[in-house]
Image (spheres, rainbow, N blue to C red):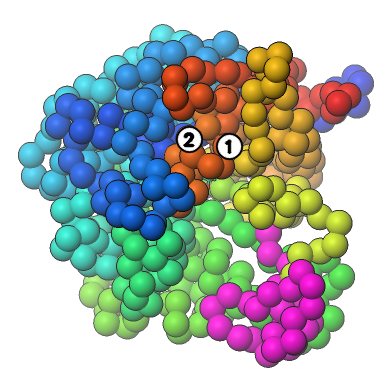
Amino acid sequence: MTTAPASANGALTFPEGFSWGTATASYQIEGAAGADGRGLSVWDTFSRAPGNVRGGDTGDIACDSYHRYREDVALMASLGLNAYRFSIAWPRILPSGRGAVNQRGLDYYKALLDELGHRGIAAAATLFHWDLPQQLQDEGGWAERDTAARFADYAAVVAGALGDRVDRWITLNEPQVVASHGYRTGEHAPGVRDPDAARAATHHLLLGHGLAVQALRAGSPGGVPVGITLDMHPVRLPGGPGTDAVEQASRIRDAELNRLYLEPVLHGRYPAQARQTLLPPDSVLALGDDLEVIAQPIDFLGVNYYAPIFMRAGDPADLRHGERKVAGGDLPGVVEYAPAGLERTPMGWLVDPEGLYELLVRLSEDAPGLPLYITENGCAAEDYVNPNGDVNDVERIRYLHLHLDAAARAIRDGANLAGYYLWSLLDNFEWGYGYQKRFGIVFVDFGTQRRIPKASSRFYASVVRANAVPALPAT
Ligand code: FCB
């Protein structure tokens, strides 16, 4: 188990060899949507259809990182970062999702990986960060079992072509969000609103993960570590459960949001507490030894943390200020709520570093010895270039300081945390919000593609340099 000693001035330090990085995703930063033989993805189709994305924004150009990757890697190097999490666009490699490989797509990622290698930045490559080839969606996408097999084929291709340059593979990013937003509510691509499709997608995403783990292991020379990234939403009851209904509801929601993905991957079973409306149907499950495949041992777990959920006793039919119904149908006597005094980011997400602390400690108890990486954490802020030409994002510095402090405390208290990837390097295409929400530590002027490092990038560089959380700078 890693230990994080306190430094001479009392600051919490991180273990030696800790990975310090930023995270991005292909559709959100690359642009170059039609370049070099790239096929269509579901996000191209979805964002180009009116009404799906704020302002009608698309990822057609985004940060143009496809052409400006050298500048972006140089920015990371200037901040002293030693790790980078990015995603590979499946439709650049297999434009139709299957069959013929597009060599020019592979060449792009080879060039990016070589650039990272020259700068001493370790590469964590995610295979699926939501840009499914449109052609596979036309055949049903993740609601169809065949997509899992196609994902494994794609994994085998990238393992063979890029496995000598990648330091860490991540199969999927946030399958929970794909199933819920992509197939149940339709607020993300592919925009499907079908509860049964969402239940099936949950299982096929996980099956795809298991098959891809096998393919990556078989195809990557030298044993590149393989893991998955899950979005985790701790359910918090700060005053204790109070009633049995709250206790039970908190277990149900934890099962549906977190353990629906965690338990199959770690233990080869679906959580009994989840409601039938979210669990994969028997017809989907009955088709083989899927759960054994899904539970292939992984080398690390990637955790994305933004905000927890709070629950308390209340009346879903008579909500108080700050309360809302528990998602997924009414649970009598219980409500979700926003505790008074907790800040929210412009996304409306609660700022609660204690959620991160609890999560890391709990995961390390549940999966002893499994290295954890925070593969995303960060916040949107109302950033702007001030008259001096600077972006003084004090809210983001405060957010990062609080969460890095929570991570360091969790390590001190036994969490097996090996790295932190800040979301995000650059302002980028924030899915349904388009370019309206800025998450970067580097400001992007989308009209000119000029990059302007924000104050938070200098704060983060100082953390990385010290390998410790410094005192919060005076504002
Ligand atoms: C996560 C996504 C990532 C980004 C952040 C803000 O759910 O994985 O792409 O949009 O949220």
Kindly check if marks 1 and 2 are in contact, taking CB atoms under 8 A apart as contact: yes
- Whether residue 373 appears in this view of the structure is no
Position in image of residue 155 (x %, y %)? 25, 42
Image vertical order of residue 364 relative to residue 83, above or below:
below
Position in image of residue 400 (x %, y %)? 72, 35
Residue 289 in the figure: left or right of residue 401: left
Q: What residue is disc 1 on? A: 439
- Whether residue 259 appears in this view of the structure is yes
Q: What residue is disc 2 on? A: 428
Query: Is the residue at mark 1 in contact range of ligand 1, meaning its CB lies under 8 Å from it?
Result: yes
Query: Could you say which quadrant of the image residue 251 lies in?
Result: bottom right
Q: Which amino acid lies under the numbered mark 1 shown in the image of this protein?
A: Phe
Q: Residue at x 79, y 73 (%)?
A: 321
Q: Residues within 10 Å of mark 2 (few under 14, many from 20)?
A: many
Q: Nearer the viewer, residue 217 or 44?
A: 44
Image vertical order of residue 177 relative to residue 71, above or below:
below
Q: Residue at x 56, y 42 (%)?
A: 437
Confirm whether the magenta stretch covers residue 410: no
Q: Which mark is residue 327?
A: none
Q: Which region is colored magenta?
A: 307-336
Q: Residue at x 34, y 31 (%)?
A: 61
* Quadrant placement of the N terminus: top right
Q: Which amino acid lies under the numbered mark 2 shown in the image of this protein?
A: Asn
Position in image of residue 416 (x %, y %)? 65, 42
Please, what is the dominant secondary structure of the magenta stretch? loop
- The disc, 1 or 2, on the residue closer to the chain's N-terminal end is 2
